[in-house]
Amino acid sequence: MLPSKLFMHIPDGFLSIPVSIVLWVASIVFIGIALRKTSKQLGDKEIPLMGILAAAIFAGQMLNFSVTGGTSGHLLGAALATILLGPWSAILVMTSVVSIQALIFQDGGLIVLGANLFNMAIVGVFVSYAVMVLIKKIIRNERIGLFFGSVVSAWLAILIASLACALELAVSGTSPASIAVPAMGSIHALIGVGEALITLGAVSFIYAARKDLLHFSQAGQKSSKGILIGGGVITLLLAILSPLASSHPDGLEWVAEGLGFIAKSEPAVYNVIPDYVLPGVSNEALATILAGIIGAAVVFAVAFGAARSRKKAS
């Protein structure tokens, strides 16, 4: 039995149990370190920013964009989160997004949730951070370095995370590395272009409007006033636009279909708001919008709550 709609993240069945366990352990270790690190770094500005950024990334991921050959991609957001918050807080933001997607929206399996967290919340973040640090050392002009870094970090975050997924598939015996790596790499290199453009647009807007929000900027600190309102409006707009998302299969599903292992996908053991469509609402566009709003609100609460709890613990 296959999922009724497209999936964006690794579903149960694609990875072996040993690989899933190893990646769960790795993810828990990194998330635990992130919780400890953020308790020493969070200020009054970062707490609301973590919550609203997580909500915006969640809503943004619902907007799949067409790539080529009947394929689509979606925002990852790891580079954007890293550029705004630094690596450790970004890990918590991405963890909030990916976990709620799996637990409430059945996007990504529960057994392989550790793998999805590792690829998106850890690999994606640290690739972005490493690129930004390197480019900042090479390019001294803050504006040029920030914009160039946002493009390269976003593109590489998508590419390297997809290659990590391909290697996990290979080690699990799902698809040989010689086939999975080039297949995943080629399509996600294209998807990464969309990620890079979206990230550049977001960073450019924030640089012009609230430069102080950027982790890699030397701008002086300003009040946190307006973060929740401005970010909330953007998140709501993204949720409203979500029915316009491409219906083409995401990169991973496209590869799974092409390489013949999509039948390994296992259905969710329970359903809450599957496929990002709120049950009981006959109008599918409205059901998608409401699902997006609910999901964004839950993700905001989780990320904001985690930030406040770490601040109190410091």
Image: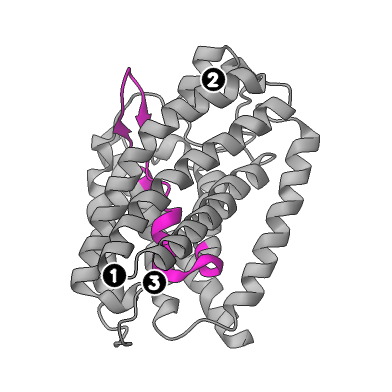
Is disc 1 placed on a helix, strand or loop?
A: loop
Residue 51 seen in the current view: no
> In the drawing, does residue 118 fall left or right of residue 172?
left
Q: Is residue 236 above or below residue 272?
A: below
Instruction: Judge left or right: residue 244 versus residue 256.
Output: left
Residue tagged 2: 256
Q: Give the mark toward the camera: 3 or 2.
A: 3
Q: Position of residue 88 (x, y in %)?
A: 56, 68
Q: What element carries label 3?
A: loop
- Label 3, on which residue? 216
Category of crowding for the residue at label 2, using alpha-carbon neighbours closer than 10 angstroms: few (below 14), some (14–19), many (at least 20)? many
Magenta includes 158? Answer: no
Nearer the observer: mark 3 or 1; the answer is: 1
Whether the magenta-drawn stretch holds residue 63 is answered as yes
**Identity of the amino acid at label 2?**
Ala
Report the amino acid beneath label 1.
Answer: Asn
What residue is pinned by disc 1?
141
Q: Quadrant of the C terminus?
A: bottom right
Tell me the magenta residue range. Answer: 61-90
Q: Residue furthest left?
A: 208
Kind of residue sitting beneath label 3: Phe
Please tell me whether mark 2 or mark 1 is closer to you in this view: 1
- Camera-side residue: 304 or 219? 219
Q: Residue sitting at 68 percent across and 21 percent down?
A: 174
Q: Earlier in the sequence, mark 3 or mark 1?
A: 1
